[in-house]
Amino acid sequence: MQEHDDTKIRRALKLAFPAVDQELQRDLWPLMLRRLEPGSVVPWYDWVLTGAVAVAFVFFPKLALLLAYHL
């Protein structure tokens, strides 16, 4: 009975979700290299967030322990 249900479920899933083409349409490495170029710009809000975290760790040093505990 269990084996029959499994095959029935597999057949239904294969019908519902057709096979996906798993080949990449293009190479992603050149795009990644372009993003890592030295001239790439870091958004201003990344610097603000980094500064806010640094200030928070200076004023609340136990925050670092709390973060380390949850990692």
Image (tube, rainbow, N blue to C red):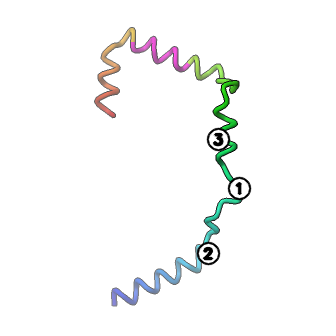
Q: Is residue 5 above or below residue 33?
A: below
Quadrant of residue 64 in the image? Answer: top left
Q: Are marks 2 and 3 in contact (CB under 8 Å)?
A: no
Magenta stretch bounds: 49-57
Q: 10 Å neighbourhood of mark 3: few (<14), some, or many (≥20)?
A: few
Between residue 1 and residue 19, name the one nearer to us.
19
Q: Main secondary structure of the magenta part?
A: helix
Amino acid type, label 3: Met
The residue shown at (29%, 22%) is 65
Q: Earlier in the sequence, mark 2 or mark 1?
A: 2
Q: Which residue is mark 2?
A: 18
Q: Secondary structure at mark 1?
A: loop
Q: 10 Å neighbourhood of mark 2: few (<14), some, or many (≥20)?
A: few
Q: Is residue 71 above or below residue 30?
A: above
Q: Is residue 22 above or below residue 48?
A: below
Q: Secondary structure at mark 2?
A: loop
Q: Earlier in the sequence, mark 2 or mark 3?
A: 2
Q: Which residue is mark 3?
A: 32
Q: Nearer the viewer, mark 2 or mark 3?
A: 3
Residue 17 image position (x, y, % from top left): 59, 73
Q: Secondary structure at mark 3?
A: helix
Residue 1 image position (x, y, % from top left): 34, 90
The residue shown at (34%, 27%) is 67
* Inter-mark Cα distance, 2 to 3: 30 Å
Quadrant of residue 6 in the image? Answer: bottom left
Residue 46 image position (x, y, % from top left): 59, 23
* Inter-mark Cα distance, 2 to 1: 22 Å
The numbered dot on residue 68 is none
Q: Nearer the viewer, mark 2 or mark 1?
A: 1
Residue 55 image position (x, y, % from top left): 45, 11
